[in-house]
Amino acid sequence: MESTEDWAEQIRALERSEAAPYIDQPTSSAWLAPAFGAWSAVYVAAFALWNVSTALFILSMLGLSALIGFFLGWYMRRFGALPMPGRGNPPPEIRREYRLYAAGVLVVAALVVLAWWAAGLAVASATAFVLVTAGYMLYAHRYERAASAVRERLQ
Amino acid sequence: MSLPELDPVIHAPKRLMAMAILANTEFATFQFLKDRLDLTDSDLSKQMSTLVSAGYVKAKKRGRGPGSVTTYLMTAQGDRAYRAHRKALFAMLGEDS
């Protein structure tokens, strides 16, 4: 018969395991933020193809989506596991960062659309590069701080 | 809440921890699980085989020979079983899951 202490210890161990994919990650590489920024800039710029050829536009969108898919696959295999947003039980500290990230994506998208409307596609593409690069750097910094807080709490 | 509500396949601590990791990731490699659970190769293989046999986990192998990588992912059946087990475990301590 297991005691209450045994159950409590099992739950603590379970929480540590659940948190592992979120907190046992390497620190974000310095090149990652500008790489995401460049990808976003190219993605926005590709909308110029819409007026040239619909087929070319669709191909470019598929190519860019495949590129990000390959990258994520490589990243996951390299580090062994990555969190799966939308399932599982992220630690509350990480969940808060996810919510801010989602809000940040909406704000960046709105500003890029605004830049496009006000100044054209080239400016929108440059805006995407700057905002995504800076936004990802900020997110990576905040995420690392949240992960440290989780590691400390679950020690 | 009584003991029979706990899943005997998942209740073993090593398997419970493996399921807890897999419930929070798309997949995990053999090495990731081994490092986090602090198990030997043979012990982890044995635990994962039990989960695969129960239909809770799927194993995929990429490549051949020494460079091959085995990854594990949780099935929908495994996800349901894990969530039910987790809920029962938390209920026993009167905690919110």
Image (cartoon, rainbow, N blue to C red):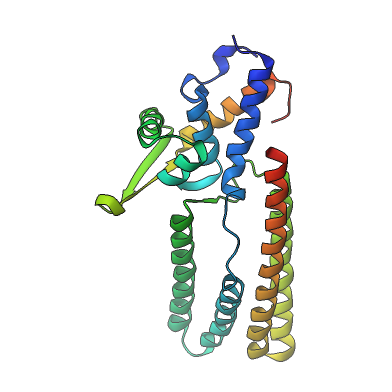
Q: Name the one closer to the observer, A52 or B29.
A: B29
Task: Give the quadrant of residue A126.
Answer: bottom right
Q: Residue at x 57, y 54 (%)?
A: A25
Task: Give the quadrant of residue A141.
Answer: bottom right
Q: Residue at x 72, y 44 (%)?
A: A92
Indicate the quadrant containing the C terminus of chain A: top left, top right, bottom left or bottom right: top right
Indicate the quadrant containing the N terminus of chain A: top left, top right, bottom left or bottom right: top right
Residue A3 visible to the viewer = yes
Up the image or down, A10 lies above or below A106; here it is above
Q: Residue at x 69, y 82 (%)?
A: A127
Residue B58: image location, x then y, percent: 39, 39
Q: Name the one closer to the observer, A10 or A152.
A: A152
Q: Residue furthest top?
A: A1
Q: Is residue B78 left or right of residue B92?
A: left
Residue A53: image location, x then y, percent: 46, 87
Residue A54: image location, x then y, percent: 47, 82
Q: Residue at x 63, y 41 (%)?
A: A89
Q: How many marks?
A: 0
Up the image or down, A15 lies above or below A53; here it is above
Up the image or down, B84 lies above or below A96; here it is above
Residue B29 visible to the viewer = no
Residue A152: image location, x then y, percent: 71, 44
Q: Is residue A128 left or right of residue B20?
A: right
Up the image or down, A72 lies above or below B47; here it is below
